[in-house]
């Protein structure tokens, strides 16, 4: 049995805009000013957006939401190598001197309008403190990585947290952070994770769905996830997740009480979880996300994922 819903490899501009929380008109403007590269077009002549196009679009939306001008975003993304925590001679982790100057200029501007732009200033300050795009994620997410050494996280992991926060909100991304903390603190698990990831990526369109490699890689994925879960439990990270839920409930309650005291209204989109700087962001259902966020997975890789899920279900304790 195959997955009942297969994520698209590429999506049209309307779905891309809906997932990113913007409009097709805004995306066309990003293309016009060179902020977002033009994607390839389908046989009908319409733009089709892939996974990396969506990742860049999400970063653009976060940076624009922080008050950074579109021209500055373009310059920052052009200067950025796209690698989180890579080795640089100057020790900078996220875009070099150009980004630092851009953020410094923006913070000075916000300071003059502090009463009106308080939330935007908080976001910028966190970006400067983190030294990378991590500062654009919600504080409940970035706080989980405070104890990690510089360079412990990879850009791909930040990309994943960005997508998770868009779909499930800050709490969902903060819980997912446990996985990346485990990988960053356990070299053997990191090495095995890279090996299994590479094996899955090798299941491209040239591999048949019933190829023996598909089942073998699914078993390897299942075994790795079991080892990762065991480490998370033994290391006490699972207990950190429990504390996170308790702290989130207390924080959410306090925020709600403060908003009632202040008479603050929700955003027009109907509320949602708190994003960076306390800004409300609308989350979406998993079903909505699957139809709007493209992943370039081959049929063989999708089958591998399904088999791994079946193995996990077989091992799950029964009531």
Image: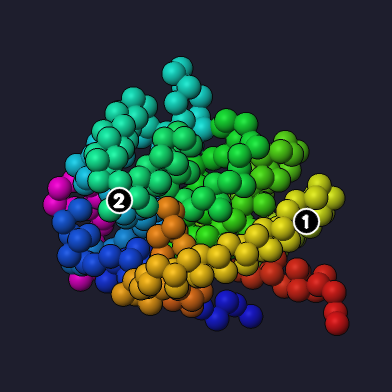
The answer to which quarter of the image holds residue 50 is bottom left
Q: Residue at x 20, y 61 (%)?
A: 26
Q: Residue at x 56, y 53 (%)?
A: 140
Q: Nearer the viewer, residue 311 or 35?
A: 35
Q: Residue at x 35, y 63 (%)?
A: 20
Name the spot of residue 177 as percent of width and height, x first: 61, 52
Reply above or below: 97 against 252.
above
The answer to which quarter of the image holds residue 21 is bottom left
- Left or right, residue 232 beside residue 157: right
Q: Residue furthest front?
A: 261
Was residue 59 drawn as part of the magenta stretch in this picture?
no
Quadrant location of the C terminus in the rendered image: bottom right
The answer to which quarter of the image holds residue 303 is bottom right
Q: Residue at x 34, y 25 (%)?
A: 97
Q: Is residue 200 visible?
A: no
Quadrant location of the N terminus in the rendered image: bottom right
Name the spot of residue 111 as percent of width and height, x first: 29, 40
- Left or right, residue 73 beside residue 299: left
Reply above or below: 270 against 121.
below
- Left or right, residue 221 beside residue 254: right
Give how far apart the Cα atoms at labels 2 and 1 are: 39 Å
Name the spot of residue 34 as percent of width and height, x first: 18, 46
Q: Residue furthest top?
A: 89
Q: Nearer the viewer, residue 68 or 303?
A: 68
Res. 239 mark? 1
Residue of label 2: 115
Secondary structure at numbered mark 1: helix
Reply above or below: 139 against 96.
below
Secondary structure at numbered mark 2: loop
Residue stretch in magenta? 31-44
Q: Earlier in the sequence, mark 2 or mark 1?
A: 2
Q: Residue furthest left?
A: 32
């Amino acid at each position: 049995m195959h997955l009942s819903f297969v994520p698209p490899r590429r999506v049209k501009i309307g779905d891309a805009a809906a997932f990113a929380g913007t409009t097709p008109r805004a995306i066309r403007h990003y293309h016009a000013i060179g902020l977002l590269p033009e994607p390839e077009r389908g046989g009908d002549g319409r733009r089709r957006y892939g996974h990396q196009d969506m990742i860049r679009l999400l970063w653009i939306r976060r940076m624009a939401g922080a008050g950074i001008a579109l021209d500055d975003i373009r310059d920052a993304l052009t200067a950025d190598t796209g690698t989180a925590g890579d080795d640089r001679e100057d020790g900078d982790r996220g875009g070099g001197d150009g980004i630092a100057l851009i953020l410094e200029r923006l913070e000075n501007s916000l300071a003059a309008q502090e009463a009106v732009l308080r939330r935007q200033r908080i976001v910028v300050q966190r970006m400067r403190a983190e030294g990378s795009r991590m500062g654009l994620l919600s504080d409940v997410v970035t706080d989980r990585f405070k104890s990690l050494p510089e360079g412990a996280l990879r850009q791909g992991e930040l990309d994943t947290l960005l997508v998770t926060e868009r779909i499930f909100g800050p709490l969902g991304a903060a819980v997912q952070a446990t996985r990346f903390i485990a990988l960053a603190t356990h070299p053997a698990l990191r090495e095995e994770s890279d090996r299994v990831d590479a094996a899955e990526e090798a299941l491209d369109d040239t591999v048949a769905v019933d190829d023996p490699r598909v089942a073998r890689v699914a078993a390897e994925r299942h075994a790795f996830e079991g080892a990762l879960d065991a480490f998370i439990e033994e290391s006490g990270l699972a207990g950190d997740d429990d504390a996170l839920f308790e702290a989130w409930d207390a924080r959410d309650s306090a925020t709600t009480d403060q908003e009632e005291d202040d008479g603050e209204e929700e955003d027009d989109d109907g509320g949602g979880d708190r994003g960076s700087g306390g800004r409300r962001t609308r989350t979406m259902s998993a079903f909505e996300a699957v139809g709007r966020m493209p992943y370039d997975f081959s049929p063989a890789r999708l089958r591998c994922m399904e088999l791994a899920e079946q193995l996990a279900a077989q091992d799950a304790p029964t009531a």
